[in-house]
Image: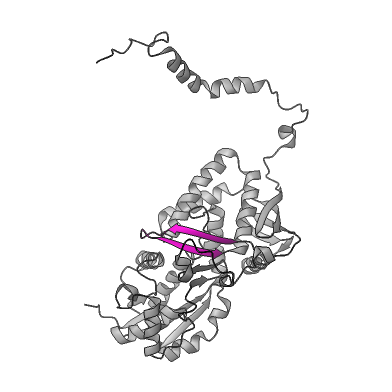
Amino acid sequence: MRPKVTKCVLAYSGGLDTSVILTWLKENYQCEVICYTADLGQEEELEGLEAKALATGASKIYIEDLREEFITNYIFPTLKAGAIYEREYLLGTSFARPLIAKRMVEIAAQEGADAVAHGCTGKGNDQVRFDLTFRALNPRLTIIAPWREWEIRSREDALAYAAAHNIPVRQTTRSIYSRDRNIWHLSHEGGPLEDPWREPEEEMYLLTVSPEKAPDAPEYVEIDFCQGVPVAVNGEKKGPVDLLTTLNKLGAKHGVGRVDMVENRLVGIKSRGVYETPGGTLLYKALQGLESLVLDGETMHYKDLLAQKYAELVYYGRWFTPLREALDAAVNKLMEPATGTVRLKVYKGHCSVVGRKSPYSLYREDYATFGADTVYDQADAKGFINLFGLSMKVRALLNIEGPGAAEGAGPTPVKRD
């Protein structure tokens, strides 16, 4: 039995799934549907969205430019934490969902809606991210996830439903990639990518040029950071949207930011995803270079552990939790000295740190030099090594001399047959 719903806020992209869902909700729940679209940098995907939603049966649609909030409150904190899921994924879809869901809850309160809906499949991670955010911010709302209810079981089924109900969609059975785009990245899943042995077709990529076709000359870029937040490119101060847009163009031109990986979804399924994150890749590389200069070894190594946990929280949809807030507080403290400039060399799909400087640098040339110096007595190293390796020495002696050989070691253990 379906719950009684009078008004529902639907996360709407205008793509195949949400176009079908809009009609399906009205048909199966007999409720008013208000569409919500967050402009996170989809660009041309937003064209004609309002007219399409209203023509398909929505009573109203909200389209909001959230790019600056997205970058400032979700992307930059994740970047500062150094969070990367399973060594490669820069979490482009993951941290977009809690922002969208948060605004949907706020719109539902404003409109007096008693339900929210999304087009996430029952096999994916996004359903968890949306549902957990809804529960964290307003657990009284009814959550409708049609992919967990209806008879449609594939994108081919959804295309057939759209055709039967005269719903205009862009997807076809020939081009059936599932994509998610925002100002941070573009992801590709499904279709030919479901064979993990098959190399992605070059025409699949929409943001980045092939590294083989990238310029033959490298390009250098300098990025300024203030306490771990990027604030300028090549000495020119920029706001969050302008800064990321600039770096996206630069990275894309040189084929930077492509990732082809098989990842572990939260629901237990392995999936293959191909990601394009040109500007984000440059930022991660640059910030890592700055951290190597301003963080002491123990701090940097512990931050790496924190980064892995932060990535899991983001990927698992647990953004609105006390733990994430606590990790943010720790990251903000750790990154207080992360102010400075990093120079990157960008060339044919690669970016490397070739220069870094900071007023808080812990690097001292007079200590690090291989030449003659007067500040470091190399003889001191002998005593340090003796103490640092003392436990290893004691264990080795035990192995050589046997149990009880050391003076005062106590009785020799009795051997039993």
Which is nearer the eye, 296 or 392? 392
Residue 336 visible at all: yes
Left or right of 199, for residue 11: left
Residue 209: x %, y % from top left: 65, 68
Image quadrant holding the N terminus, namely: bottom left
Q: Residue at x 58, y 63 (%)?
A: 277
Span highlighted in magenta in the image = 257-276
Left or right of 92, for residue 221: right
Any magenta on residue 265? yes
Is 122 located above or below residue 28 in the figure?
above
Q: Residue furthest right?
A: 372
Left or right of 146, for residue 290: right
Q: Residue at x 38, y 60 (%)?
A: 269
Any magenta on residue 262? yes
Q: Quadrant of residue 267?
A: bottom left
Which is nearer the eye, 197 or 38? 197
Which is nearer the eye, 373 or 228? 373
Q: Residue furthest front?
A: 197
Residue 384: x %, y % from top left: 59, 23
Residue 112 visible at all: no
Q: How is the image coloured?
A: one colour
Image quadrant holding the C terminus, namely: top left
Q: Residue at x 70, y 23 (%)?
A: 377
Residue 143: x %, y % from top left: 32, 73
Magenta stretch: helix, strand or loop mostly: strand
